[in-house]
């Protein structure tokens, strides 16, 4: 991985504003998928959102990214209210999202797939781009250079012109993260980034997320079922169960919280860590 943080067309990626979720409720008929959920992801941290299946994690990501409307409550990035905005506007306001399922066209190259993330930043319309107007060509060159930097940052620099459909699974997942980074986010939503990965790919993705936090200063909001990865990486963890926040704290705090033990195991046995930190003695 490149040691140098990308910098370029869109300027600094660093963020000084927290992402704040304030009392968000989402109802689907009688079901409250989220019930008065609040959390605060501090700038430049990895904040994990965990919970059993059906706890509301995807619904929360869908509210933050503008896909679902909250029944009540707000999401703010600094002083900007994100709730009520459409997904493309939320992206433009600084929230990038890498999806769990592999997105992107399998026949297009790594570079072209990363460029998809930059379209909302390009001033040139299709007509002037198609007519190869010099200013349009200049802008396209700058954006391609930036996409290349991001690819190199994610160790994809050697594969720029490879169709993503023939890449190994781990590389393809990193292209998805690169596409999200190409939107120049201040907050990056990562939806199960290591789902389906082997141990080597998981270690590489974990290193990638650490580098995003350390070098780019981006706030990462992470939904992930791999508890060893979450507990080794997250600065803070919010635990959802049945749409409610049942715990919030450092990995060490939540892994000992009886409410988390109940959520995962259906027991209040306080001698058992709720979730493995990967550091327990055998
Ligand atoms: N569009 C929808 N319409 C109706 N119910 C929904 C919708 N989206 C989610 N739900 C329900 O809301 C609840 C929370 O689902 P959600 O997908 O957010 O959970 P999750 O924590 O992401 O689960 P998993 O870990 O299995 O992905 C579930 O009961 C789910 O069936």
Image (spheres, rainbow, N blue to C red):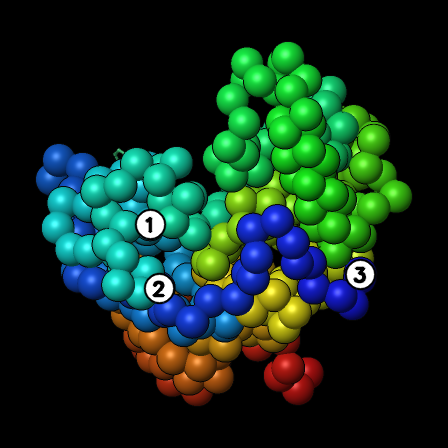
Q: Nearer the viewer, residue 192 or 70?
A: 70
Which quadrant of the figure shows ligand 1? Answer: top left
Q: Is residue 163 left or right of residue 106?
A: right
Residue 41: x percent and y percent?
39, 69
Read off the residue under disc 2: 19
Residue 18 visible in the snapshot: yes
Residue 192: x percent and y percent?
54, 50
Read off the residue under disc 1: 64
**C-alpha separation, residue under disc 3 versus residue under disc 1:** 29 Å
**Is ligand 1 closer than 8 angstroms to the Cβ of mark 1?**
no
Read off the residue under disc 3: 1
* Residue at the spot 63% in from the left edge and 29% down from the top edge: 135
* Residue at the spot 73% in from the left edge and 20% down from the top edge: 107
Q: Is residue 36 above or below residue 180?
A: below
Please state, as top left, top right, bottom left or bottom right, where the C terminus lies in the image.
bottom right
Residue 25, labelled with which disc? none
Q: Crowding near pointer 1: few (<14 within 10 Å), some, many (20+)?
A: many
Please state, as top left, top right, bottom left or bottom right, where the N terminus lies in the image.
bottom right
* Residue at the spot 31% in from the left edge and 65% down from the top edge: 78
Q: Earlier in the sequence, mark 1 or mark 2?
A: 2
The kind of secondary structure element at disc 1 is: helix
**C-alpha separation, residue under disc 1 versus residue under disc 2:** 9 Å
């Amino acid at each position: 991985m490149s040691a140098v943080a990308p910098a370029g067309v869109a300027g600094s990626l660093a963020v000084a504003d927290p992402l704040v979720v304030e009392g968000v409720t989402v109802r689907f008929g009688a079901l409250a998928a989220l019930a008065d959920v609040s959390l605060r992801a501090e700038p430049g941290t990895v904040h994990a959102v965990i919970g059993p299946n059906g706890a509301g994690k995807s619904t929360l990501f869908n509210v933050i990214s503008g896909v679902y409307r909250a029944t009540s409550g707000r999401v703010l990035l600094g002083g900007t209210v994100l709730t009520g905005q459409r997904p493309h506007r939320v992206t433009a306001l600084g929230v990038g999202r890498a999806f769990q399922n592999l997105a992107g066209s399998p026949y297009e190259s790594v570079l072209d797939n990363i460029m998809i993330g930059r379209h909302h930043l390009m001033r040139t319309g299709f007509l002037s781009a198609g007519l190869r107007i010099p200013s349009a060509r200049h802008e396209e060159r700058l954006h391609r250079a930036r996409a290349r930097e991001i690819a190199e940052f994610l160790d994809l620099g050697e594969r720029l012109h490879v169709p993503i459909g023939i890449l190994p699974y781990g590389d393809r997942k990193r292209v998805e993260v690169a596409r999200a980074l190409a939107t120049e986010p201040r907050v990056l939503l990562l939806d199960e980034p290591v789902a389906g990965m082997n141990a080597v790919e998981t270690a590489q993705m974990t290193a990638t997320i650490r580098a995003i936090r350390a070098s780019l200063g981006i706030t990462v909001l992470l939904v992930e079922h791999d508890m060893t990865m979450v507990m080794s990486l997250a600065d803070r963890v919010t635990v959802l169960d049945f749409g409610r926040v049942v715990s919030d704290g450092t990995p060490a705090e939540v892994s000992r919280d009886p409410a988390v033990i109940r959520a995962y195991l259906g027991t209040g046995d306080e001698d058992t860590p709720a979730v493995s930190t990967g550091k327990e003695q055998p």
